[in-house]
Image (tube, grey):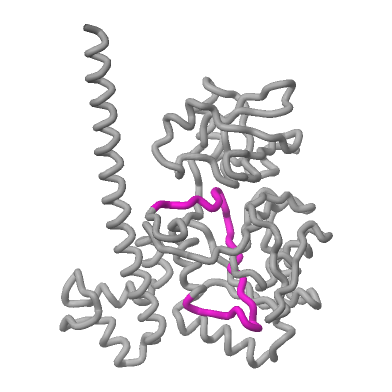
Amino acid sequence: MKLSEIGFDRWFESHADTLRGHCKFIARVTAVDRDQYVIRNEDGELPAELTGRFVYTSESRTELPCVGDWVSVQYHDSGAHASIHYVLPRKSLLRRKTSGKSIEFQLIAANIDVAFLVQSCHYDFNVQRLERYLVMVNEGHIEPVIVLTKADLISTEEQEQLVEKIRQAGVGHRILTLSNETGKGVDQIREIILPGKTYCLLGSSGAGKTTLINRLVGYSEFETRDVSHTGEGRHTTTRRHLIVLEHGGLLIDMPEMRELGMLGVSEGIDDSFADIHDHSKNCRFTNCTHTNEPGSAIRDALAREELDADHVQNYLKLKKESEFHDLSYLEKRKRDRAFGKHVHSFHKAKGKQNDR
């Protein structure tokens, strides 16, 4: 298999040329399990680990490899395993705030061309949650496609109503409905997936992601288990893995993300809520919060029913959440840098004492 068949195009090749003097071999990360990596090259998959120098010089975990990354490597023991020296620049990056109270980025996957945002027509449908996913993929410069599964469980009229709810939220992206039970609509997904391009599935457990993957792969590569109170299938895999499909497309399987915290997503919010962002340009004040200030174009649009109230409320909520976490992250980085300078000064002074 050529590297071009697993996504290595001219863009990556041009960036890899700058690393040729260090390591001439290039591979792609297909799985990450704590500090253990699996990479794929022309001959197949093999284990890999980071060099000590790479770990030491990395200022944060965002500089470490994640699934989908292209890396510069050296092979050992006749190619049985490898060491990772560098990460090539990324075309796109899927990331979120780490779960819980910690204010830090968590990398999910890199170099994705299209993200399928999967929700069930049956019980999982939630426009506000869909908007969170849209912010995340738009911030990462990834094309979103919305997939509504389990369409066989509701009528055609009810399906149209769900699509209309999404459109009322200002979402203009492509929407597909399918049934994993009958297979209707799966061919539309296959038509989108092109050889050498990378895709991922994002959505809650029970939305039908694993069943869809198995249909695309052509056999039951992944297991599902029932959830007693809903009867929905739930994915048993807990790690992300890049899969090479038979027809040449590349698919990254994603376990459920229970928390979708907003951090560093101002651009993604503006793109995902483009209708609201366009109205906000006509506000009297540039720093308008669209709550109590006079001359708010957003409030005027709500009064004219040009914007959906729930849509605007979610926009304000996500924007406030992102701004709060962004400030917390900047403060954390300042403290980290100050501490690093302190440690550096301490070691420097200690070295001078030892020289005397």
Is 157 drawn above or below residue 166 in the view shown? below
Residue 215 appears at what percent x and percent y? Answer: 78, 65
259, 268: nearer the viewer:
259
262, 24: nearer the viewer:
262
Q: Residue at x 79, y 57 (%)?
A: 221
Residue 250 appears at what percent x and percent y? Answer: 68, 52
Residue 159 appears at what percent x and percent y? Answer: 64, 86
Q: Quadrant of residue 274?
A: bottom left
Work out which quarter of the rendered image holds the N terminus and state it: top right
| In-image side of 302 versus 11 (left or right) | left
Range of residues picked out in magenta: 104-128
Q: Is residue 107 magenta?
A: yes
Is 321 drawn above or below residue 246 in the view shown? below
Work out which quarter of the rendered image holds the C terminus and state it: top left
17, 323: nearer the viewer:
323
Q: Residue at x 48, y 30 (%)?
A: 54
Residue 262 appears at what percent x and percent y? Answer: 40, 63
Q: How many discs appear?
A: 0
| In-image side of 26 versus 87 (left or right) | right
Residue found at the far top of this picture: 356
Q: Quadrant of residue 282?
A: bottom left
Q: Residue at x 37, y 70 (%)?
A: 318
Q: Is residue 239 magenta?
A: no
Q: Residue at x 69, y 71 (%)?
A: 208
Is 201 drawn above or below residue 23 in the view shown? below
| In-image side of 181 versus 315 (left or right) | right
